[in-house]
Image (cartoon, rainbow, N blue to C red):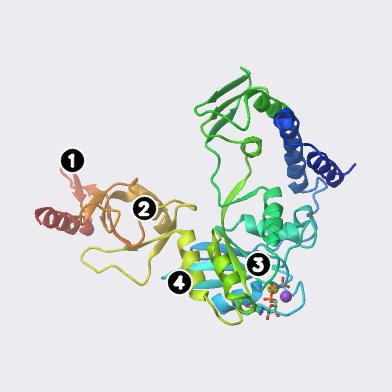
């Protein structure tokens, strides 16, 4: 029996099993079996040949990556062209787009890469259409825009969410607060800091045993269910933010638009009538939570046109992350930084590498003194770099005021 048939069989078994206390263990085990099969399905075939044709990964560019995912003909390509100016062919027939088309959104002095993708259909996760390649690109995105046709049934959102979930993508949730570590010996050390209402120690044992894991440390710090435990064990889940973009509201009633606008993480737009594109850009910006940092040289004004853009999800937003982004030698040369902005207590605040920056902070990095040469009298002449002296002067001036 192939993997797909096995999956179908388990899904069928789950569908006909009543959900109650008595069947909780049975269902938990079926879920683990299903997760294992799905992981197997994702793995590249052993013969070394690609799974269903070429991938269409494009080079990463800019300060973050957003991918457009949705059924065919919901208006993904029209949206790419509207937001980035890059032409991506749009037409009234399905599967107009056959590959990944990159564009760039210029917003708030940041550059955000937007990727148009072929439409996907139910069964994409199992390799239907170009599902696998589309999903691979989705996994590389910092934010997904799930484009939906506002005039079509709202169930499409659930179908797509299920497709993404079955390949390990979790939308708008955080990883469960669980400490888990496989061990070589010692059995299962099971602990929880909160009452567990959805699973118990016995079920954890059973699910772990399904993975042939008999020695592990498990410390559960929130009321998780079997699915979340399986996510922890599988360990390869991708937690991604997702904004649901309901396009084509030009053909909807005001009431329908109003209803969409109230759904969580959702925004109504119309590409062809150019309705709410600005609102969409604002939501993209907010969800990406990018941190623009303006670096400043001593005695000069900061360059407000050209920020260094940091992200909490990608690389981090501490001064150390800023240094790394500027140059690989910067962390080694770092002495301290002066920070002006919402993250600093006073103007400027002297901060170390671990200080977390906020959007629109201004930062001046002061490098270590460099010892240059022996002065001939057995002592090392240390030469302070220009910025340090002026920075010190500035600091003193700041301290006086
Ligand atoms: N009424 C209406 N039609 C739209 C809107 N946006 C796009 N369309 C139309 O919807 C059709 C499909 O648009 P595309 O941009 O090709 O859709 P797609 O999602 O890229 O489609 P595939 O690449 O085939 O998956 C085209 O005929 C567009 O003109 C909109 O806001 N309102
Ligand atoms: K189309
Ligand atoms: Mg398209």
Q: Is mark 4 within 8 Å of ligand 1?
A: no
User: Looking at the image, is mark 3 or mark 1 nearer the viewer?
Assistant: 3
| 260 or 52, nearer to the observer | 260
- The image shows residue 14 at horizontal and vertical percentages of 78, 39
The secondary element bearing badge 2 is classed as helix
Relative placement, left or right, of 43 versus 313 is right
User: Looking at the image, is mark 4 or mark 3 nearer the viewer?
Assistant: 3
Q: Is mark 2 within 8 Å of ligand 3?
A: no
Task: Return the residue at label 2.
Answer: 330
Look at 20% across and 52% down and name the residue there.
Answer: 383
Task: Return the residue at label 1.
Answer: 378
Say which label, 3 or 1, has the lower sequence index: 3
User: Looking at the image, is mark 3 or mark 2 nearer the viewer?
Assistant: 3
Task: Return the residue at label 4.
Answer: 107
Labelled pair 1, 2 in contact (Cβ < 8 Å):
no
Relative placement, left or right, of 170 versus 342 is right
Relative placement, left or right, of 294 versus 54 is left
For the N terminus, give its image quadrant: top right
Using a 10 Å C-alpha cutoff, classify the residue at mark 3 as few (fewer than 14 neighbours), some (14 to 19) or many (20 or more): many
Quarter-of-image position of residue 303: bottom left
| Residue 211 visible, this angle | no
- The image shows residue 105 at horizontal and vertical percentages of 51, 72
Say which label, 4 or 1, has the lower sequence index: 4
User: Looking at the image, is mark 4 or mark 1 nearer the viewer?
Assistant: 4
Say which label, 1 or 2, has the lower sequence index: 2
Quadrant of ligand 3: it is: bottom right
| Residue 88 visible, this angle | yes
Using a 10 Å C-alpha cutoff, classify the residue at mark 4 as few (fewer than 14 neighbours), some (14 to 19) or many (20 or more): few
Q: Which mark is residue 148?
A: 3
Please tell me how many numbered marks the rendered image carries: 4
């Amino acid at each position: 029996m192939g993997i797909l048939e096995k999956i179908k069989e388990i899904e069928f078994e789950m569908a006909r099993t009543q959900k109650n206390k008595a069947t909780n263990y049975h269902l938990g085990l079926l879920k683990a079996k299903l997760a294992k099969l799905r992981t197997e399905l994702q793995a590249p075939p052993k013969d070394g040949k690609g799974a269903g044709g070429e991938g269409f990964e494009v080079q990463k560019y800019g300060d973050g990556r957003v991918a457009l995912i949705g059924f065919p003909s919901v208006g993904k390509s029209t949206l790419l062209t509207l937001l980035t100016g890059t032409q991506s062919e749009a037409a009234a027939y399905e599967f107009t787009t056959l590959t990944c088309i990159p564009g760039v959104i210029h917003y708030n002095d940041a550059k955000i890469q937007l990727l148009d993708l072929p439409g996907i259909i139910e069964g994409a996760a199992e390799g239907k259409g170009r599902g696998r390649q589309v999903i691979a690109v989705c996994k590389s995105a910092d934010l997904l825009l799930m484009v939906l046709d506002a005039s079509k049934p709202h169930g499409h959102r659930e179908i797509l969410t299920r497709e993404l979930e079955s390949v390990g993508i979790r939308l708008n949730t955080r990883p469960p607060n669980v400490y888990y570590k496989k061990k070589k010996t010692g059995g299962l050390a099971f602990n929880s800091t909160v009452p567990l209402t959805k699973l118990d120690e016995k079920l954890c044992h059973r699910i772990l045993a399904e993975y042939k894991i008999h020695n592990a440390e498990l410390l559960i710090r929130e009321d998780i269910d079997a699915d979340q435990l399986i996510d922890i064990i599988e360990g390869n889940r991708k937690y991604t933010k997702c904004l649901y973009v309901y396009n084509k509201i030009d053909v909807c009633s005001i009431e329908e638009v109003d209803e969409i606008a109230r759904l969580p993480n959702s925004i109504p737009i119309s590409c062809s009538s150019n309705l709410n594109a600005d609102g969409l850009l604002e939501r993209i910006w907010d969800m990406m939570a990018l941190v623009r940092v303006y670096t400043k040289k001593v005695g000069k004004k900061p360059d407000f046109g050209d920020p260094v853009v940091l992200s909490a999800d990608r690389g981090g937003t501490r001064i150390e992350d800023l240094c790394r982004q500027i140059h690989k030698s910067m962390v080694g040369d770092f002495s301290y930084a002066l920070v002006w902005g919402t993250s600093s207590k006073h103007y400027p605040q002297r901060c170390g590498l671990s200080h977390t920056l906020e959007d629109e902070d201004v930062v001046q990095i002061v490098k270590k003194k460099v010892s240059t040469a022996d002065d001939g009298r057995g002592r090392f002449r240390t030469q302070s770099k220009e910025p340090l002296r002026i920075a010190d002067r500035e600091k003193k001036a700041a301290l006086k005021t």
